[in-house]
């Protein structure tokens, strides 16, 4: 009877690297995120007169089968289609209709990435780097792994798109409102499989794209658009077919431009007694709007006439909406701008939406403006700035954003008393508000800096720090902290400068820029010392110590933590004392003073427990468990890590839970509970995979490989180490990559795959030499020599072994030298000795 084949199938996601095979494996995939419908605007039901253009665009997107070198059928289409034309001609609408049609036909299983670049709005224009950051986030790339520079982001973006396409999940990129080819070129796929639509008011011939330029509608289609748009509001309305001459004249007055036609239809819908002929007469009497810098006269006349139909209160709201600097506005923020209650404001917003002067956002109770309308409204707002009290409205809005951010932040502050009393009932509600409003909050911080509110910029940046840390949005955090630091320095706000430097240092640690973090914390501590602010100085020294430990400057770290502990105790800051003790314990462990480290972590956990800070208690218990392992108190270590994992799971801190589970797995190995250790490491890797933290997933996979070796599951261990090495290579952590390659080589020897083991150890050796890691070099040489001996390449093994002996001798590492000498002697006994002995 044939032996049944074991096969695992993973579906519903992109998997990089080989799959893990085994009897009892639980693969935890992250929930599916819709890349297509979540950000793609809704299409208009009155899409008229564009069938030929739609067919041409869909033709460029239609996949055609082509065989790659391996003979595999792959979908191919025109890579880029550039849709050009006049403002308001319907470029975005055509792109959206085509994207939705392509999705319905299954041409882009990976979804659609849509971005409005606001290329014709000087105030909101988005550079390619900003857009790439958002798209990479939508594709699951964590903030700490998004490169700083736009060119690097583009390379990562294109690589991910290519991987999606290779797995049968083509993606369509829609770059809307592009001004120049340069603004779009970094966003475009280059793999020949994925596709893009670019819309612009220019013909972007320099993009090497298929060009599709839109013209205005002909008279029949324009009249049809008027009729169909009007019938959306009034299904039985017969004014357009009942007055064909007047309707044709109205279409001509609108310049046959879809945007103007929709506004005209809205004006007719608002006044059932009005006729197309009468509206045409009014349009011809309206003067062009000064300050609308682009678009046809008919569009400006339509905007003006639409605006004139509004009540004074509606006009006031329309003008003030442009005070908000972000991409959309909530009903609450709109009410703050006008000083009115929310129900009244909501009704007026709906009135503006019916007139097509604003449109609904992507979430309930959120509103946005087309860029042409926004520019028009801004011009009006500046003309009425005094009567609208525009400056006061901005001040109210900034105060609202700051107060709400502080209220939300209270749910993340372990020292805050009764955070629900500040406005948000739960942490989940607070986090949801921060997630939604972050683009507005970052824009508000910049606007405050430019409009005479520097203190708001600094305070808002500091209030967002805990949230940005919670969501691991390190690039946003660095940008805001840098802005706050510069503004505070320019205005002489020394205390604000110190706070901004402290948060900047924490953010820099998040992206592993440790030396810069050390400098930021040193500067912050110096400022607080100068100001005599002992408590803040203690916090800065605590952060400094943690950053120093990351670069293995443990003695300096210990000194910094001892200093901050003295300050915290002097000022009676119990929470600060707990944090200082926890970080001191980690620094002590770094120099092998494990018993002292255990006491520090125990004391820290006790303080956090006393204060009710469960999250910090979980972190201290995790560090305690790691220190207990170092002194052989394994059962106590297991208990500490189990407690930490339980606390962090209870709080919903997924990243912290992953760390605790991974540490638990390592402790379980030490007490011989290998299968439990494997399960813990697998759970940790699954959490990191869910969060998109490739670096931490690599660490968990490496530890999983070590546990699998102890469990005798060598082939699975090889797979885990290979995946870990790939992740570390991808994230640029060369030292960790070398360590994992060394572990991979050892397990490859166990499976008899000697040539592969030799290659892994050679790679490890090259990395150690590249980094100047002499101890790692000696270890890699010893392991390489052992692998060569197993392959019966005795002469090479002895030469490599002698090099290891020499390396350890130069460092004065007597135990390492002894191990290397013993390995050489074993090789000599096993086979052949060289002509000369260099020992």
Image: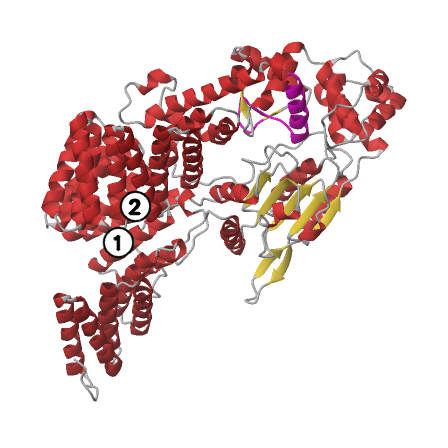
Screen quadrant of the N terminus = bottom left
Specify how the rendered protein is coloured.
secondary structure
Residue 657 seen in this snapshot: yes
Residue labelled with disc 1: 703
Q: Residues within 10 Å of mark 2 (few under 14, many from 20)?
A: many
Let me know if residue 364 is in the magenta part: yes
In the image, 5 versus 628, the foreground residue is 628
Q: Which mark is residue 554?
A: none
For this view, does 468 lie left or right of residue 742?
A: right
For this view, does 376 lie left or right of residue 836?
A: right
Task: Tell me which residue sits at (43%, 25%) in the image.
Answer: 455
Task: Tell me which residue sits at (38%, 20%) in the image.
Answer: 424
Q: Name the element at disc 1.
A: helix
Looking at the image, is mark 2 or mark 1 earlier in the sequence?
Answer: 2
Q: Which residues are magenta?
A: 361-384
Q: Which mark is residue 684?
A: 2
Label pair 2/1, CB-CB below 8 angstroms: yes
For this view, does 317 lie left or right of residue 560?
A: right
Which image quadrant is residue 74 in? bottom right
Instruction: Locate residue 218, reporting x and y percent.
Output: 84, 34
Which image quadrant is residue 569 in? top left
Q: Name the element at disc 2.
A: helix
Instruction: Locate residue 8, reporting x and y percent.
Output: 38, 55
For this view, does 377 lie left or right of residue 665?
A: right
Instruction: Locate residue 4, reporting x and y percent.
Output: 35, 61
Residue 432 seen in this snapshot: no
């Amino acid at each position: 009877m044939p032996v049944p084949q074991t096969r695992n199938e993973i579906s519903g996601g992109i998997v990089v690297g080989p799959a893990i095979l085994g009897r009892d494996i639980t693969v935890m995939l992250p929930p599916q995120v819709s890349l297509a419908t979540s950000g793609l605007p809704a299409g208009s039901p009155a899409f008229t007169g564009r069938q030929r253009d739609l067919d041409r665009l869909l033709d460029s997107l239609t996949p055609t089968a082509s065989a790659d070198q391996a003979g595999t059928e792959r979908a191919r289409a025109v890579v880029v289609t550039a849709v050009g034309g006049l403002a308001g001609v319907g470029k975005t609408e055509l792109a959206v209709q085509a994207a939705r049609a392509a999705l319905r036909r299954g041409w882009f299983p990976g979804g659609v990435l849509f971005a409005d670049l606001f290329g014709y709005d000087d105030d909101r224009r988005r550079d390619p780097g900003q857009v790439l950051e958002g798209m990479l986030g939508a594709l699951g790339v964590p903030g700490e792994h998004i490169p700083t520079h736009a060119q690097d982001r583009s390379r990562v973006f294109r690589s991910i798109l290519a991987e999606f396409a290779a797995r049968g999940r083509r993606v369509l990129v829609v770059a809307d409102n592009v001004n120049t080819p340069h603004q779009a070129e970094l966003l475009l796929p280059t793999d020949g499989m994925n596709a893009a639509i670019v819309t612009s008011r220019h013909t972007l011939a320099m993009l090497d794209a298929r060009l599709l330029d839109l013209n205005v509608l002909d008279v029949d289609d324009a009249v049809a658009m008027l009729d169909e748009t009007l019938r959306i509001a009034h299904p039985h309305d017969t004014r357009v077919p009942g007055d064909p001459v007047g309707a044709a004249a109205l279409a001509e007055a609108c310049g046959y431009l879809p945007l103007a036609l929709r506004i005209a239809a809205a004006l007719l819908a608002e006044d059932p007694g009005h006729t197309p002929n009468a509206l045409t007469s009014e349009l011809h009497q309206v003067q062009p709007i000064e300050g609308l810098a682009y678009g046809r006269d008919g569009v400006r006349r339509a905007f003006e006439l639409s605006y004139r139909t509004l009540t004074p209160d509606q006009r006031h709201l329309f003008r003030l909406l442009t005070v908000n600097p972000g991409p959309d506005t909530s009903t609450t923020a709109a009410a703050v701008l006008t000083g009115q209650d929310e129900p009244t404001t909501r009704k007026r917003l709906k009135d503006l939406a019916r007139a097509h002067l604003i449109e609904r956002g992507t979430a309930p109770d959120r509103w946005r403006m087309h860029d042409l309308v926004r520019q028009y409204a801004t011009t009006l707002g500046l003309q009425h700035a005094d009567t609208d009290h525009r400056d006061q409205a901005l001040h109210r809005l900034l105060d609202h954003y700051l107060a709400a951010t502080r209220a939300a932040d209270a749910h993340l502050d372990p020292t805050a008393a009764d955070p629900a009393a500040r406005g948000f009932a739960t942490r989940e509600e607070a986090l949801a508000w921060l997630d939604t409003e972050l683009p507005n909050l970052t824009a508000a911080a910049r606007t405050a800096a430019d409009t005479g509110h520097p203190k708001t910029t600094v305070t808002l940046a500091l209030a967002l720090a805990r949230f940005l840390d919670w969501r691991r949005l390190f690039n946003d955090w660095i940008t805001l902290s840098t802005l706050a630091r510069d503004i505070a320095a320019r205005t002489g706000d020394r205390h604000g400068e110190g706070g901004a430097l402290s948060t900047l240092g924490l953010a820099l640690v998040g992206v592993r820029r440790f030396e810069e973090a050390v400098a930021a914390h040193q500067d912050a501590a110096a400022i607080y010392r100068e100001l005599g602010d002992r408590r803040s100085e203690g916090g800065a020294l605590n952060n400094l110590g943690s950053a120093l430990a990351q670069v293995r400057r443990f003695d300096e770290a210990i000194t910094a933590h001892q200093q901050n502990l003295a300050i915290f105790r002097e000022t009676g800051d119990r929470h600060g004392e707990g944090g200082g003790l926890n970080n001191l314990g980690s620094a002590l462990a770094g120099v092998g003073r494990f018993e002292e480290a255990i006491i520090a972590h125990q004391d820290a956990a006790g303080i956090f427990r006393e204060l009710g800070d469960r999250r910090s208690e979980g972190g201290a218990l995790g560090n305690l468990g790691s220190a207990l392992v170092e002194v052989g108190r394994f059962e106590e270590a297991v208990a500490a890590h189990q407690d930490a994992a339980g606390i962090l799971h209870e709080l919903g801190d997924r990243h912290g839970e992953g760390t605790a589970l991974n540490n638990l797995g390592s402790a379980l190995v030490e007490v011989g509970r290998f299968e439990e250790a494997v399960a813990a490491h697998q759970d940790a890797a699954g959490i990191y995979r869910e969060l998109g933290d490739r670096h931490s997933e690599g660490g968990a996979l490496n530890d999983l490989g070590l546990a699998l070796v102890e469990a005798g599951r060598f082939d699975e261990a090889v797979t885990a180490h290979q995946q870990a090495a790939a992740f570390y290579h991808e994230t640029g952590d060369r030292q960790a990559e070398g360590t994992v390659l060394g572990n991979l080589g050892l397990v490859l020897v166990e499976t008899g795959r000697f040539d592969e083991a030799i290659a892994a150890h050679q790679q490890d050796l090259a990395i150690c030499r590249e980094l100047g890691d002499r101890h790692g070099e000696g270890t890699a040489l010893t392991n390489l020599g052992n692998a060569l001996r197993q392959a019966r390449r005795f002469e090479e093994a002895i030469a490599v072994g002698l090099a290891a002996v020499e390396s350890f001798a130069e460092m004065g590492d007597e135990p390492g030298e002894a191990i290397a000498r013993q390995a050489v002697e074993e090789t000599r006994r096993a086979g052949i000795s060289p002509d000369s002995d260099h020992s």
